[in-house]
Image: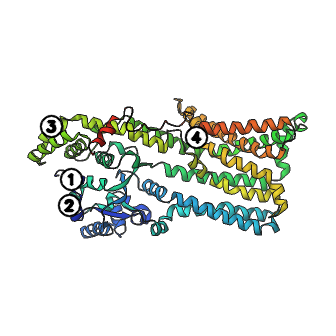
Amino acid sequence: MDRLRRPESFDDVHAEGLFRGTTALQILQNRGIIFAHGLEGLLGAGGFRPQKIPTKQEVLEAGARIFDNTSCAEHVNVFVSHCWGSKRWAKYLALCLYLNFTAAVVCALGTWVAAVTVMLVFGGNFATSHRFNLLSFSIVVYLPTAVFFVVFFLGHHVLHRFRPISLWVDRACVHQTDDELKRRQIQALPVFVARSSSMLVLWDDSYFQRLWCQLELATFAKYGGAAKVQFQPLWLAPWLLSALALDLAVATSWNIIFYWVPKATLTSTSSAVLPTLVLESPFAPLVEGMVFTTTNAIALGVLASIPWTYSCKKKLRNHALMLEQMAAFDCRAAQCTVEADRILVELQVRQLFSSPEKEDEADLTSSSHPLSPRSLPSVHGVSSCDSRALDDFNAFIRGPLRSTVLESVGGEMHVPYGMCLSASLPMIFWSVSDILQYCHCGVGDGLRSCAAPLIIGWVINILLVLPIVYPVFLRMLKCALAVRSEWLQLILSALSGIVTFCHSSNCQGVAFVLPTLGVQDTATRWVGFTFLAFLLLQISCLFGNSGILPAPAAAPETGNDGTYRRLHTADT
């Protein structure tokens, strides 16, 4: 392969029609079939049946169709960087999360508000019946959750019309069956990266080991900066969807327990266990609620611990691996199919991260030794003599880029507060159904007087209790996985899920009971204030700036970030 082209040669590349752009509609059609391996992806994206045995003409036509569906571009909004060996479904879900997540949350909340309005206006006539409970739960919980999933998977069909986003994806924008055109486009890869407004990295465990992925990162580091690189780990979307499905199951279970199981059954356990002295005290409702909640939470925790452990265990290991790979990054250890490509890529990286004087010297040497098979060793010598440029690239990945990733996705045990709230949407949706059913009425003075303590309890739960579930479980699971015995790991992981579920459920129960007790005496007030302070401290430790979160990335002008500073002084 000839020498890679410089980003400054964009005018020539554009005139040759090499720089192409595509849309989310094309990439995500047929559930991301374009990301399927081999001929299946080529044929499926090209309009043929993926399972058929194609003729040579059909293969060529499929490649031409995919390429013709792209368009010439001067710049694109997002350059999608990924490994070809990653799973198709993982990439499809990651792009759905990137493109549609915000719209899915907004549409789900909008549907919920509309459903709540309908229930408040028309639900009063049959609020005491099981029919009302089934109807309200279906409309207020299932319907908004279904809207979330529909928009999550299909929202780009509508969003593209209002806010079109241009993408560069190699499988579509590089001709897959015209070898000559493909060679020229690969040579112009640095141009494509430099003309992209942002880079989306679909990370998997092999991403930092791939040579061409490193070239894309190096080029964008020069012309875009670390702040415009967004990492989308391929485990994140499956984790979020499984968390939502699990939360929906939990909300359904609590609704059945509270409104379908006879009241006598619910109170018999606490009455049988607690002594008379406790039952006659002012805190009897609080203690009874905790006993009832713990009993049911253990049962639900046993069922939830298995899917929790699977998804969170995968999250912990993959997240830690991503940060470890960045901390120990070395571009010289990259893997490539064609070994001659390593020389080209390292030469390009050296030019990107070299000082202007050394870059000019390299240009003179390269011009006198064109990249033909006979001259490759001499060029390799030129590249190896300036190994500091490769070290600077390594330092950029280990320093500024890793800090940016930590700022956006956090450490291995961190889950953003907003993401935790999103994973709790079904429970949030259930709050209104619970209030209406508990107060046995629709709208009016009766609703306001009866619902006030319950509304206060739900507000506390939504803001301070529901988001803590996964951060707490991740920390407990981390300790459980530190044990060497696999059987002990399994037992401790299950116990971690049960304890986490009991802890969050008891916090929810206390948050509901305390407002109903009101301000009966000084002791009750102090218990309420102490509990609220505990919840605030818990949220601060899990999501605040108390050392749990990674420290912000250092500014480019200070600290050990000299690589980033040297990289951009060449442009001034």
Q: Nearer the viewer, residue 11 or 482?
A: 11
Q: Name the kind of residue labelled 1 in the image.
A: Arg
Which label belongs to residue 12?
2
Find the distance from the CA under tag 1 to the CA under tag 4: 45 Å
CB-based contact (under 8 Å), mark 4 and mark 3: no
CB-based contact (under 8 Å), mark 4 and mark 2: no
Name the residue at 53% across, 38% down.
413
Find the distance from the CA under tag 2 to the CA under tag 1: 10 Å
- Where is mark 1, residue-wise? 5
Residue projecting furthest to the front? 572
Which label belongs to residue 381?
3
Sequence-wise first label, 3 or 2: 2
Looking at the image, is mark 3 or mark 1 nearer the viewer? Answer: 1
Element at label 4: helix
Element at label 1: loop
Which label belongs to residue 543?
4
Name the residue at 58% across, 44% down.
308
Q: Name the kind of residue labelled 4 in the image.
A: Phe
Q: Name the kind of residue labelled 2 in the image.
A: Asp
Find the distance from the CA under tag 4 to the CA under tag 2: 49 Å
Name the residue at 59% across, 38% down.
542
Find the distance from the CA under tag 3 to the CA under tag 1: 20 Å
